[in-house]
Image (cartoon, helix red, strand yellow):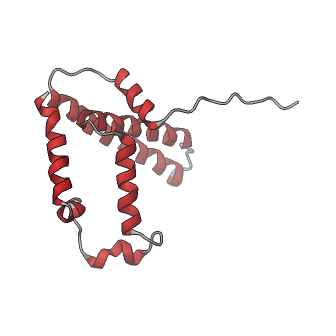
């Protein structure tokens, strides 16, 4: 007789982002908070890279570690969004829009080469100055709290 697996309750990105706040250290100095989240995501990305390297090149299957570290990176990404007052879902949707514009037919090396130029991360902001002003005002709002 086959045992039924219990289905885990699914949560939304917004619920996850809110839950992350409950598990985060509280800081008195805002600069310490964003510094912690920025350094933390970098450290977890390094751990993730190490697990991938061990899995691929050392014959040491670290898939569980890869999965765990992806979760840790998501936690830090959520906390960075919380710091700036951004909705993680909105951030991902903006990224999706950017990628669809960059790769309209899916990834191609030609589109990725982008005319052999280095494109600044603010490339879209130049084309939409009114939105850039709004985002700048929103990101500065945390500093005034």
Q: Nearer the viewer, residue 80 or 142?
A: 142
| Horizontal side, residue 12 vs residue 30: left or right | right
The image quadrant that residue 14 belongs to is: top left
Q: Residue at x 23, y 70 (%)?
A: 118
| Horizontal side, residue 91 vs residue 145: left or right | right
The quadrant of the rendering that contains the C terminus is top left
| Horizontal side, residue 56 vs residue 75: left or right | right
Identity of the residue furthest to the right in this view? 1
| Horizontal side, residue 2 vs residue 26: left or right | right
Report if residue 55 is visible in the image: yes
Q: Residue at x 16, y 20 (%)?
A: 28
- Give how far across and how far down residue 76 sits, in percent: 34, 36
Q: Residue at x 39, y 51 (%)?
A: 93
- Give how far across and how far down residue 4 sits, in percent: 77, 30
Give the vertical position of 112 relative to 5 (above or below). below
Q: Residue at x 34, y 25 (%)?
A: 21
The quadrant of the rendering that contains the N terminus is top right
Q: Nearer the viewer, residue 45 or 26?
A: 26
- Give how far across and how far down residue 128 sits, in percent: 20, 61
Identity of the residue furthest to the front in this view? 130
């Amino acid at each position: 007789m086959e045992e039924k697996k219990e289905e885990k309750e699914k949560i939304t990105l917004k619920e996850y982002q809110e839950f992350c706040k409950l598990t985060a250290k509280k800081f008195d100095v805002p600069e310490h908070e964003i510094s912690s989240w920025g350094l933390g995501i970098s450290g977890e990305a390094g751990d993730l890279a190490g697990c991938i390297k061990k899995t691929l090149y050392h014959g040491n299957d670290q898939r569980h570690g890869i999965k765990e570290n992806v979760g840790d990176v998501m936690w830090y990404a959520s906390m960075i969004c919380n710091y700036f007052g951004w909705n993680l879902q909105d951030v991902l949707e903006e990224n999706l829009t950017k990628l669809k514009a960059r790769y309209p037919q899916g990834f191609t090396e030609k589109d990725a080469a982008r005319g052999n130029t280095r494109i600044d991360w603010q490339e879209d902001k130049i084309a939409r100055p009114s939105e850039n002003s709004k985002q700048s005002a929103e990101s500065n709002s945390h500093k005034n709290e």
